[in-house]
Image (tube, helix red, strand yellow):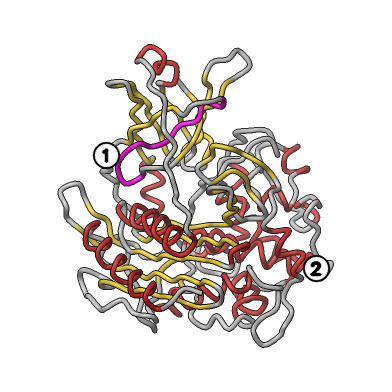
C-alpha cells in the first residue's frame, strides 16, 4: 500500500502542473488498494473565484455514458432488457434515414459505438420530461456513415437513444432512474443531473485559454436536458468518482451490502465487445467502457469534455487502482489530464506510459493522406509540410450555435505515421500530444476516411 508520502508528492505534482499549464482549477483523486489520495488546486472561476476543495463539483462529461450503460445492465439482470434485442423492442417508433438500420440496431450497438450513424447531433429539445423523445425523433434526419456494426465511431446520439430505452422500459424520467438505481444505493450524494441541483453547491465553471494566453469563462454552462444520458450535464466531485470506481472494481454490491449488479456483469462490461486498434478511444470497446493495454496491463477508462471542462476516469482492476482528474479549462485541461495519468501510473503502479515513435516518410508518401474529411460536427483538413502531416479542424457554425460556443482557435496538430500496418498515426506535439488515430482505405486501396478523436470522418476530397 502506498504511503501518505506518495499523496504529498501527488499534491505537489498536481499544483506545479496546473500552474505550468495555466489551468484555473483541478481536482484529482487516486484509489489504490482501497486507500484514497486526493489533490486540489486553484479556483472554480477566474471571474468569481472560490478555492477548489473536496466538495467542488465539476462536469464529468461523457463518463456519464457509463452510468447509462450500467443502469441498462441493471435492467438486463432484472429481465427487462436484452442487449441483443432490437432497439425497436423498447422504442417501436424509432425512425432513422436507413430503415434497415432502424429495424436491426440492437441495444448493444448503442453501448459500444457501432451503430454507424453520425453521432454528434446536438439539438436543444427543451427541459420537459419529453426532451429525449423529441431528441430521438430528430435523429431521423442524420446520415448513416458506416454499415451497422462494422466500425467503431464515437456516438453521442446512440446514448440519447439508450436513455430513451431506459425511460420507455421503466416509465420514469432518465434522471430519476439513475438516481434510484445507482446514485442513492452507492451513496453518491454529490453527483447531480440538473443544473438547479448543482447551483446550491460549490461548482466549477468551464474556461478556455486563447493562443494569446487569455483565459475566459465559457458559456452556456450546460448543454440541455437531451444530453444528460450522453454525460452532457452530470456533475460530480472526486469522492463520488472514486466511489464509482470502487463499485466497478468490486463485486457489484454497494457499501451497505445492496447488490446492484453481479460481479460477472461488471466483468462483462469491461470485456471487449469490439476491437479497433489505433483508435483514440483505445484498443477495444466493452459495454460503454473504453479499453486499452499499457505495457501489458489492461486499462478500463472513460473521460469527458463539456464546454471548458475536461475529465478523465481510469481504472486498472487487476491492480485495484483508479485515478480521476477533473479540470476546468481547455485546451490545456486534456494535456493536464494526460500528464496526471502518466505520473500516477509511474508513481503508484511502476508503469511508464511511452509514446509510440512514428516513422520518417517523405512528403510524396505523406501526400496520400492529405485531404478534407468531414463529420456531422466538424471539418478536418490534413496537409503536408516539412516531412509531417498537419491536422487542422473547424467546428461547423451550426454546431457552435447549438452549443452556444465560440469557434476555438487551437493550433493545428502535427501527425506522425506509426510503423506497421493499419495507417495508424499519433499526434507528436502540442496539447493533444500522444493522441492516436488511423486512416482507412477503400476497396481500391486509396485513403477514404480517417479516425480522429474516436470518430470516423469521411474523406470528401
For label 1, the crowd category at 10 Å Cα-Cα, with few meaning under 14, some 14 to 19 and many 20 or more, is few
Q: Nearer the viewer, residue 317 or 252?
A: 317
Whether 17 is drawn above or below 411: the answer is below
Q: Nearer the viewer, residue 348 or 206?
A: 348
Q: Please tell me which residue is depicted at 75% across the width and 64% down the height of the picture.
A: 265
**Image label count:** 2
Mark 2, residue position: 77
Q: Does residue 287 appear to the left or right of 305 in the view shown?
A: right
Q: Please tell me which residue is depicted at 61% across the width and 39% down the height of the picture.
A: 276
Q: Nearer the viewer, residue 356 or 52?
A: 356
Magenta segment, prevailing SS (helix, strand or loop): loop
- Give the alpha-carbon distance from disc 1 to disc 2, as whole Å: 47 Å
Quadrant in which residue 407 is drawn: top left
**What's the magenta region?**
421-432
Residue 295 percent location from the top left of the image: 53, 47
- The earlier-in-sequence mark between 1 and 2 is 2
Whether 79 is drawn above or below 391: the answer is below
Residue 245 percent location from the top left of the image: 57, 70
Mark 1, residue position: 411
What quarter of the picture does the C terminus occupy?
top left
Amino acid at each position: 500500500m502506498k504511503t501518505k508520502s506518495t499523496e504529498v508528492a501527488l499534491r505537489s505534482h498536481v499544483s506545479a502542473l496546473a500552474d505550468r499549464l495555466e489551468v484555473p482549477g483541478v481536482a484529482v483523486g487516486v484509489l489504490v488498494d482501497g486507500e484514497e489520495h486526493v489533490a486540489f488546486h486553484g479556483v472554480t472561476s477566474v471571474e468569481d473565484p472560490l478555492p477548489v476543495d473536496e466538495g467542488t463539483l465539476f462536469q464529468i462529461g461523457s463518463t456519464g455514458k457509463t452510468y447509462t450503460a450500467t443502469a441498462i445492465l441493471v435492467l438486463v439482470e432484472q429481465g427487462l432488457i436484452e442487449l441483443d434485442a432490437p432497439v425497436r423492442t423498447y422504442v417501436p417508433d424509432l425512425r432513422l434515414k436507413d430503415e434497415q438500420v432502424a429495424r436491426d440496431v440492437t441495444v448493444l450497438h448503442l453501448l459500444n459505438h457501432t451503430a454507424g450513424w453520425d453521432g454528434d447531433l446536438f439539438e436543444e429539445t427543451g427541459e420537459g420530461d419529453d426532451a429525449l423523445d423529441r431528441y430521438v425523433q430528430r435523429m431521423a434526419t442524420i446520415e448513416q456513415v458506416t454499415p451497422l456494426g462494422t466500425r467503431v465511431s464515437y456516438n453521442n446520439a446512440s446514448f440519447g437513444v439508450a436513455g430513451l430505452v431506459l425511460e420507455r422500459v421503466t416509465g420514469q424520467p432518465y434522471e430519476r432512474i439513475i438516481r434510484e438505481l445507482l446514485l442513492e444505493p452507492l451513496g453518491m450524494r454529490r453527483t447531480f443531473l440538473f443544473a438547479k441541483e448543482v447551483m446550491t453547491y460549490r461548482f466549477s465553471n468551464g474556461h478556455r485559454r486563447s493562443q494569446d494566453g487569455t483565459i475566459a469563462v465559457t458559456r452556456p454552462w450546460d448543454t440541455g436536458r437531451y444530453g444528460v444520458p450522453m454525460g452532457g450535464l452530470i456533475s460530480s466531485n472526486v469522492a463520488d468518482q472514486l466511489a464509482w470506481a470502487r463499485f466497478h472494481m468490486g463485486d457489484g454490491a454497494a457499501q451497505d451490502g445492496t447488490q446492484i449488479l453481479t460481479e460477472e456483469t461488471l466483468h462483462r462490461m469491461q470485456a471487449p465487445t469490439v476491437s479497433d486498434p489505433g483508435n483514440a478511444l483505445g484498443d477495444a470497446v466493452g459495454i460503454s467502457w473504453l479499453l486499452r493495454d499499457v505495457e501489458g496491463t489492461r486499462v478500463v477508462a472513460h473521460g469527458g469534455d463539456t464546454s471548458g471542462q475536461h475529465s478523465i476516469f481510469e481504472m486498472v482492476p487487476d491492480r485495484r487502482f483508479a485515478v480521476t482528474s477533473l479540470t476546468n479549462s481547455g485546451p490545456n485541461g486534456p494535456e493536464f489530464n494526460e500528464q496526471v495519468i502518466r505520473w500516477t501510473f509511474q508513481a503508484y503502479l511502476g508503469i511508464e506510459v511511452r509514446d509510440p515513435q512514428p516513422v520518417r516518410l517523405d512528403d510524396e508518401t505523406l501526400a496520400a493522406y492529405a485531404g478534407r474529411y468531414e463529420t456531422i460536427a466538424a471539418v478536418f483538413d490534413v496537409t503536408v509540410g516539412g516531412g509531417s502531416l498537419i491536422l487542422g479542424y473547424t467546428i461547423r457554425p451550426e454546431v457552435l450555435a447549438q452549443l452556444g460556443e465560440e469557434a476555438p482557435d487551437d493550433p493545428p496538430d502535427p501527425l506522425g505515421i506509426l510503423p506497421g500496418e493499419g495507417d495508424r498515426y499519433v499526434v507528436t506535439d502540442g496539447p493533444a500530444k500522444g493522441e492516436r488515430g488511423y486512416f482507412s482505405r477503400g476497396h481500391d486501396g486509396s485513403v477514404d476516411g480517417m479516425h480522429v478523436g474516436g470518430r470516423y470522418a469521411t474523406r470528401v476530397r
